[in-house]
Amino acid sequence: MAAIGLLIATGAGFLGRMHWTFDLFSHFRVQYMQLCLILIGIALWRRKNKKAVALVLLACLNYAFVLPLYFGKPAPPTGPTVRTMLINLNASNGNTEQVLEAIRNADPDLLLLEEITPTWANELAVLETDYPHRVAEPQEGCFGIMLLSKYPLEHGKIIEIGTASVPTIIADAHLLQGTISIVGTHPLPPVGASYSNHRNNQLAELPDVIKAQKFPVLLIGDLNTSPWSPYFRDLINASELKNSMKGFGFQPTWPSNNRLLRIPLDHMLHSSEITIHTRFVGGDVGSDHFPVIVDFSIR
């Protein structure tokens, strides 16, 4: 029965375009593979070799989606790099000291904060000295957003993409190596048909926004989808951006309080002119998300 359940869950993950609930099953490929390994051990112990072989095939099917993340790691940098950090604060978190400590320890050049409320904006005003350049749209609720930079930002603006009426930041960052365009966004979570449609619409319209930028693009945000959703793959294919996780393996960020169900929802996607040299998940900041930190250079 457990094996049949895993088979159904695996199959449902391929049907995400048919119904929003099926898309939810696409996010747990690693967990399906791990459960298969447990069942393989039980099947071998009970000498049910045919079932063990079937479970091996099922485990391989799921892990085939994950394995490419471990290949293609770029060469070490030959010069200075730029550090970018993404933190989904959690609008109701309130653990200011943990957040400030994480930012100071990482010392990013570019910092995107999501779920930033007016209260959060006031509590993090101490960052103004280190980050004199910013584009911000604090909001009550879960969709306020703020971009902070040590380097000058030009053409910074807040736009709405898709049908959800949530803010997205666009700005050109003038770095020492050159200029890049930052797109910071946070689609709705896919909880229910309406929210799923809003998320999918936003992901579908992002490629047009990305292609309209003059400089290489770094797309940053809690996209509320994993790399194995068909809608994420559509975004990658249509935008021609690359997943910064490639070469660094499985790096889950949510939920912070449940290691067994943790999946990668927080992303940094980049143009081919941007090379990612380091990517890692930060420590606990009191949110339900872990931060993502990336070091990159511009070719």
Image (tube, grey):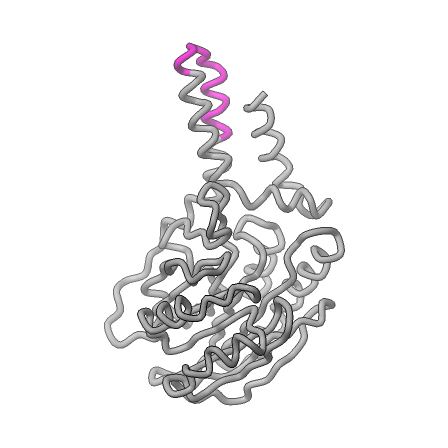
* Chain part drawn in magenta: 44-58
Q: Which quarter of the rendering shows the N terminus?
A: top right
Task: Identify which residue is drawn at 36% across, 61% down.
Answer: 279
- Dominant secondary structure (helix, strand or loop) of the stretch shown in magenta: helix
Question: Could you tell me residue 30's position as x and y percent?
Answer: 47, 40
Question: Could you tell me residue 141's position as x and y percent?
Answer: 64, 68
Q: Which quarter of the rendering shows the C terminus?
A: bottom left
In the figure, is residue 73 to the left or right of 173? left
Q: Is residue 49 magenta?
A: yes
In the figure, is residue 208 to the left or right of 257? right
Task: Identify which residue is drawn at 41% across, 83% down.
Answer: 126
Question: Could you tell me residue 80's position as x and y percent?
Answer: 27, 76
- The image quadrant of residue 13 is top right
Residue placed most toward the observer, 240 or 35 = 35
Task: Identify which residue is drawn at 44% across, 58% down.
Answer: 290
In the figure, is residue 212 to the left or right of 165? left
Residue placed most toward the observer, 65 or 93 = 93
Task: Identify which residue is drawn at 31% across, 70% down.
Answer: 105
Residue placed most toward the observer, 148 or 4 = 148
